[in-house]
Amino acid sequence: DASLVARALRCIEEAAPRGSMSPLDRSRTIDRQKHEDLLKTATHVEHKGYKGGGGPDKVVLPPGKSRHVHTAVKQIHVPVERTVRVPVVKKHVERQTETKVVNGVKMVPVKKYRTVKETVLETKEEVVEGFREEWKKVKVPTKEVVKKQVPRTVTRQVPYVEYVPKEVVREVRVPRDVIKEKHGIRVDKHLGTKVMTIEEDHHYEMRPVKVKTGDVRVMETGYQHHGKSQHGRSQFNP
């Protein structure tokens, strides 16, 4: 029952010692209802008997009466829930960057020209004087145009691309992560049992009260002589 456990926890708090006390004085007086609540919520009850081995712990003598007090001791385990603050450390990665200067070589294309000599064939017409045949069967001088291939050497500039190395400097953003620690507090709830010792005084008043009549016992304890009641006759041996 939740309400019963709550009442038991309040009983424990009220029964807890206040301030700095010696071990013999760490006890408080509770009423009968709180005592019953503690016993109902306890998970384990162990009777330890009487304080001092069963004999009277103390004797109170009020005027005209004699009273003996025996202290009954029992140990109980009461479930409790505690809140505990636990320090925690957590590691996390912090993302950072930094600038690095990097030297490199870049190949740059450069357009250049080189001189090339080549031979080309040109068609050239020239007039060649010769002879032709006619039906007269007579050779007559004539002229005709003849095309001939004449080689000629020319020089021209041919472009080409040449790659030239060039040193370059670049600024590069590189990662520079670091691990940092976070310190904090974690609140845990611990379940356990609180061991409590309960002492209860039993008061006995010493009064003569007849309960019943027991068995009759007899034994000889001696002889007492009170005198002679008869004088006897004498008898002799033959």
Image (cartoon, rainbow, N blue to C red):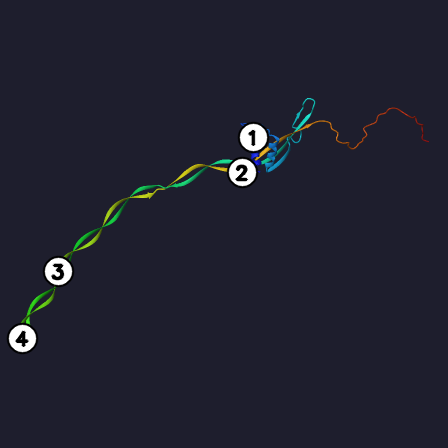
Badge 2: how crowded within 10 Å, few (<14), some, or many (20+)? Answer: few
Describe residue 77's horizontal placement relative to residue 156 as left or right: right
Between the residue at mark 4 and the residue at mark 2, the CA separation in whole angstroms equals 142 Å
Q: Which mark is residue 14?
A: 1
Q: Circle 4 sits in a helix, a strand or a loop, which is it?
A: strand
Q: Disc 3 vs disc 1: which is toward the camera?
A: 1
Quadrant of residue 179 within the rendered picture: top left
Residue in the picture at 21% in, 53% down: 161
Q: Which residue is mark 4?
A: 139
Residue topped by disc 3: 153
Residue linked to disc 2: 191
Amino acid residing under circle 3: Thr
Q: Is residue 80 above or below residue 148?
A: above
Is 196 drawn above or below residue 138 in the view shown?
Answer: above
As drawn, 157 above or below 191: below
User: What residue type is disc 2 on?
Assistant: Leu
Q: CA distance from mark 2 to mark 3?
A: 109 Å
Mark 2 residue element: strand
Amino acid, disc 4: Lys
Label 1 SS: helix
Query: Which residue is located at x 19 percent, y 52 percent?
Result: 111
Q: Position of residue 61 (x, y in %)?
A: 67, 23
Crowdedness of circle 1 by 10 Å Cα count: few (<14), some, many (20+)? some
Quadrant of image for the C terminus: top right
Q: Are marks 2 and 1 in contact (CB under 8 Å)?
A: no
Between disc 2 and disc 1, whose residue precedes?
Answer: 1
Q: Amino acid at mark 1?
A: Glu
